[in-house]
Image (cartoon, helix red, strand yellow):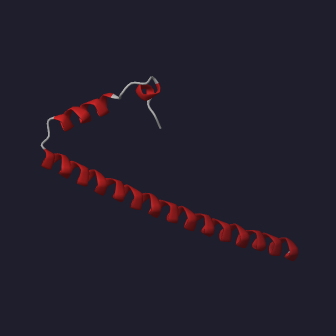
Amino acid sequence: MPGDDQKAGQIPRADKDYLRTLGTQSLSELGQSLRTLTQNVGSLTNQASRLASTQKNIQIGLAIGFAFLSILIAILKFLH
């Protein structure tokens, strides 16, 4: 989500600071920074995938639980 600076068409302070550090890095340092960034994005992607899988499992568990509860309530009403 864009912040207030981005909405106003300005570069956020943290981004300005990062860009400033890039200007003083050597090419090898820049390459290492890009590799680290790539690894971080990959890690974030994996975490998001695991979160989506966990959410799906929770939804399935809740659906089964509610179905079981509905059947149990129907049986209890029938017996009384």
Q: Residue 39: image x %, image y %?
A: 29, 57
Q: Residue 27: image x %, image y %?
A: 14, 46
Q: Residue furthest front?
A: 27
Give residue 35's quadrant in the image: bottom left
Q: Nearer the viewer, residue 36 or 55?
A: 36
Q: Residue 16: image x %, image y %?
A: 28, 30
Q: From the viewer's perspective, is 62 left or right of 31?
A: right
Q: Is 34 drawn above or below residue 17 in the view shown?
A: below
Residue under the point 87% across and 75% down: 78
Q: Nearer the viewer, residue 21 or 47?
A: 21
Q: Nearer the viewer, residue 46 or 23?
A: 23
Q: How many marks?
A: 0
Q: Residue 80: image x %, image y %?
A: 87, 73
Residue under the point 18% across and 35% down: 23
Residue under the point 46% across and 62% down: 49
Give residue 41's quadrant in the image: bottom left
Residue under the point 46% across and 34% down: 2
Q: Is 4 drawn above or below residue 75 in the view shown?
A: above
